[in-house]
Amino acid sequence: MNDEQIGSSKQRNRTEEHLKLALIELIKEKGYHAVTIKDIVSHASYNRSTFYIHYRDKIDLAEDLLDSMLEGLEDSVGKPYVPGQKIYTVNLHAPSLSIVSYIYKYRNFFELINYTDTLPELHTRFPQAILKIYKEQFVFETINDIPVNMDYFKLYTAYGFYGLIQNWIKTGFKESQEVFIQEVINLSKTHIHSFEYKGSK
């Protein structure tokens, strides 16, 4: 890739980021269904032809926004670990939960779960992404090696974690990241003895 292509790629990414940001802000202001392409380009200070270079329609933009944010969420989880690494919950500390830092960093986006007329499929795909992470990236050991149905265990643990995240977002991130992470770690110690990071696919 030459310098011109790199510059063009950066410009494309920057334009798409501006359009996504405009969509987020407009959903909070007037609800997803009321937002028009005219609103988006006006808010982002572009023209309609620029929009159509990047996206077919509002749905295309919304899908790209949701896909990119949830892919980022999945990628963020493994940052503190190496594949094959086994982690004991007694040794967990704040950097171990990089997923929480990711959600806080992109809180402008994740706050969209507070809205009823919001990004299509956000309320279902966000918890499903957490479950996918638990299913694909980790092998868990229960406290005292208690035998359980591991599919149920991951479902229970993933949706429990999502519930905590949802509450944290809905209360306007009232607790600091550090306090919230410590609460999650304390709860994890009640039922998870250790986990092995398998790596992302």
Image (spheres, helix red, strand yellow):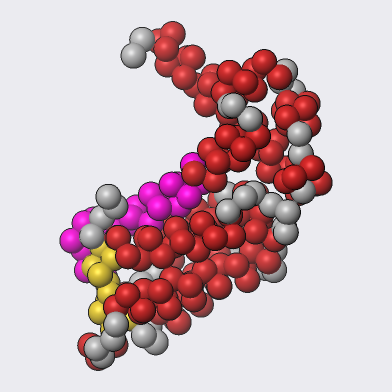
- Check residue 85 for magenta coloring: yes
Q: Which residue is nearer to you in this view: 93 or 78? A: 78
Q: Please indicate whether residue 5 sits to the left or right of residue 141 in the image.
A: right
Q: Which residue is nearer to you in this view: 9 or 27? A: 27
Measuring from the top left, give residue 105's x and y in whole percent.
56, 50
Q: Please indicate whether residue 30 sits to the left or right of residue 51 in the image.
A: right
Q: Which stretch did the figure color magenta?
A: 68-89
- For the question of whether residue 93 can be seen, the reply is yes
Measuring from the top left, give residue 70's x and y in whole percent.
48, 50
Residue at x 55% of width, y 73% of height? 163
Q: Which residue is nearer to you in this view: 70 or 94? A: 70
Residue at x 62% of width, y 20% of height? 52
Q: Please indicate whether residue 194 sits to the left or right of residue 133 in the image.
A: left
Q: In this view, does 158 lie above or below 31?
A: below
Q: Which residue lies furthest to the left in this view?
A: 84
The N terminus is located in which quarter? Answer: top left
Residue at x 77% of width, y 48% of height? 31
Measuring from the top left, give residue 82's x and y in whole percent.
23, 55
Residue 41 found in image quarter: top right
Q: Which residue is nearer to you in this view: 4 or 70? A: 70
Q: In this view, does 178 lie above or below 55?
A: below
Q: In this view, does 11 lie above or below 137?
A: above
Residue 139 found in image quarter: bottom left
- For the question of whether residue 88 can be seen, the reply is no
Q: In this view, does 53 lie above or below 100?
A: above
Q: Please indicate whether residue 75 sits to the left or right of residue 32 in the image.
A: left
Residue at x 18% of width, y 61% of height? 84
- Check residue 119 for magenta coloring: no
